[in-house]
Amino acid sequence: RPLTDLDRAVIGVLKNKLSMPLETVKYLMAIDADTKVHRDSLSNMIYSMNKDETILALCGETRVENKRDSWVTWIQVFEYYTNHHMKKA
């Protein structure tokens, strides 16, 4: 497929900012700054991708830790639930 603007931006950062040869990059994980990754997540994702080469991307489950703190966080929980279970899954 033709490269997208995002592809070109990621390639530019890997090559020019991080000095990483592209042929050494097999996996790329993008997360928010406040995201906590479960200890087993990476090994499970890599296992799944190595087992089936048709898997090009994976998404995880988002949990809001402060979900009972305010009505805003309650809405966040609902949004994350609907996005993951109704759109992505």
Image: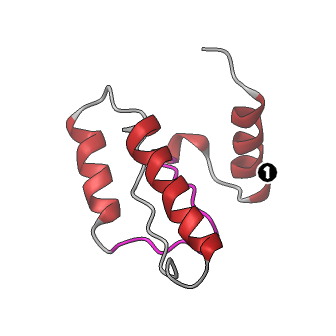
Q: Residue at x 24, y 32 (%)?
A: 52
Query: Was residue 50 drawn as part of the magenta stretch in this picture?
Result: no
**Picture coordinates of residue 61, whole percent (x, y):** 39, 58
Task: Describe the element under mark 1 as helix, strand or loop.
Answer: helix
The kind of secondary structure the magenta stretch mainly shows is loop
In the image, residue 67 lies at what x, y percent? 50, 77
Of residues 47 and 80, the one drawn nearer to the viewer in this rendering: 80
Given the current orientation, which residue lies at the most extreme bottom position? Answer: 69
Q: Relative to residue 57, is residue 13 drawn left or right?
A: right
Say which residue appears at 44% left-offset and 68% top-offset.
63
Q: Residue at x 73, y 36 (%)?
A: 6
Left or right, residue 84 beside residue 42: right
Query: Which residue range is magenta in the image?
Result: 25-38
> Residue at the spot x=50%, y=45% of the render?
83
The residue lying toward the viewer, choosing from 5 and 27, is 5
Name the quadrant of the N terminus.
top right
Report the number of numbered marks: 1
Q: Quadrant of the C terminus?
A: top left
Q: Residue furthest front?
A: 71
Q: Residue under label 1, please give it.
A: 16
The correct choice, above or below, for 47 with respect to 56 in the image is: below
- Position of residue 4 relative to residue 76, above or below, is above
